[in-house]
Image (tube, helix red, strand yellow):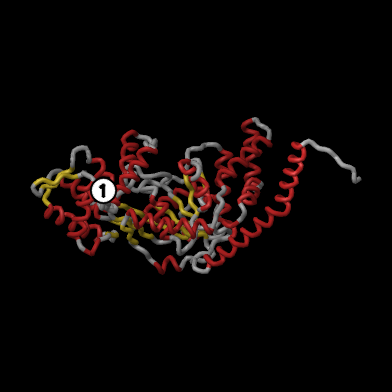
Amino acid sequence: MFRTVELPLWALILILLFAAVTFASHFLFPSVRWFFRRRMERVVAKVNQRLDRPIEPFKLAERHDMIQRLIYDPKVTQAIVDHAREEGVPENVAFESARRYAREIVPSFSATAYFGFGTRLARWLSNRIYRVRLGHYDEAAIKDIDPDATVIFVMNHRSNMDYVLVTWLAAERSALSYAVGEWARIWPLRTLIRSMGAYFIRRKSRNKLYRRVLARYVQMATEGGVTQAVFPEGGLSLDGSVQAPKLGLLSYIVNDFEPGESRDVVFVPIALNYDRVLEDRVLIEANKQGNRKFGFKVSGIFGFIFRQIRFIFTGRFHRFGYAAVSFGQPMSLTEFMNSGAKGPEAVGNALMDRIRDVLPVLPVPLVATVLLQAEGAISEDELTTRVSALIDQIAHDEGHVHLPRNSVDYAAEVGLRMLKLRKMVAVNNNAITIAPDHQDELSFYANSIKHLVH
């Protein structure tokens, strides 16, 4: 027993390595996980004290546990069996596909990342780029929402800045869970986005098994009370107008809902508008081509960022006008379905109507609308007069106009200045005309309020 045993050096190193891994996995790692778990629980408890809607346990579940719960859900299990039969593959192969989809979809929420970093960055970035304004907001209606209901913010989609703006503005109410497309799956962005509670979706996938796994995750999150943010249009608006709803995520929620049996779902419509959409020219070009292939280039993005940095250091930087967010009348899914209107399409159309009703009207869309209506040169005085008349018409129809400094003259001035800075209009001898080849850009901004103009 006490004899000397000789070993090659490589074997000794291998034994020590295995021993170190065993020690770490059985003693060190559990302690480290316990330490960080306790730390996270303290952070969550502190955050929940100031949130109107505390973070639900579903959102805080370990990612591995959530993946297991999802793939062993009875409806997903049945979908695996159906997929295996339809595709003629073994069930274990279909099961591994479902597992891969679940790992792709399920987020890994971090309260520290969301409230310690994400919302602060969102606030700084929003105010650095825009003059952010809160439009219509019925505080009493928002506070009257049943605290046990699942709240889903439903928004029109103008820009990727929508995520940033709403994350910041809703930070005092709850942590939002977004569905994001394939663009966000690049490293290291995907890790950050997962930690913010977002989940990835393949917007164009027609794979039945993938859709079933995604549907069950959305339904489980809804049942678990997770506050979510949904863009029913399914993507960025290519022409600037509010689009008809696409019913993907909404259909998952509505089709699984049973009034009186399920936890109530309350949709809160949110309408966003901008004096300048960062991606406007990319979207306009995609609209001309008749597809959603956006011509984003990394070199172009970095070029834009470096130009803005140069403008800041040379004192030539101007914020991109106003960005405004309005909150519409909340809609209880239980009350809506009990009223006789049923189905995802009816829900989607009702929500988009509520979004259109409260869409903020800003200086650039106002001025763009007037210039397009003029169909020729117009003086600055005439521009102001027509902007004033347009504001009166929209306000008479209970539209929501943001008047900077509460002045029509200043609103016309701000809108014109923004268009001049971007060389979309020309001013010669007090005659304002649309610059050649910029008709599409003005139409893009005018379209955002065209449903309010008659």
> Picture coordinates of residue 261 (x, y %)?
58, 59
Q: Secondary structure at mark 1?
A: helix
Closer to the camera, 316 or 160? 316
Q: Residue farthest to the right?
A: 1
Give the camera-side residue of 371 and 199: 199
Residue 303 position (above or below residue 145): above
- State left or right for residue 57 relative to residue 357: right
The quadrant of the rendering that contains the N terminus is: top right
The answer, for residue 337, to whether it is visible in the render is: no
Q: Residue 53 vs residue 393: left or right? A: right
Residue at the (32%, 60%) spot, across then down: 133
In this image, 144 relative to 66: left or right?
left
Which quadrant holds residue 211? top right
Instruction: Report the residue marked by disc 1.
Output: 446
Residue 143, visible in the rendered structure: yes
Depth check: 64 or 157 in front? 64
Q: Position of residue 285 (x, y in %)?
A: 32, 37
For label 1, the crowd category at 10 Å Cα-Cα, with few meaning under 14, some 14 to 19 and many 20 or more, is many
Residue 420 position in % (x across, y down)? 20, 48
Q: Is residue 282 above or below residue 368?
A: above
Question: Looking at this rendering, what residue extends furthest in the top direction?
Answer: 88
Q: Is residue 110 above or below residue 54?
A: above
Q: Is residue 440 left or right of residue 195?
A: left
Q: Residue at x 35, y 57 (%)?
A: 127
Q: Position of residue 51 (x, y in %)?
A: 49, 66
Q: Residue furthest left?
A: 429
Total residue callouts? 1
Q: Amino acid type of disc 1?
A: Ala
Q: Quadrant of residue 403?
A: bottom left
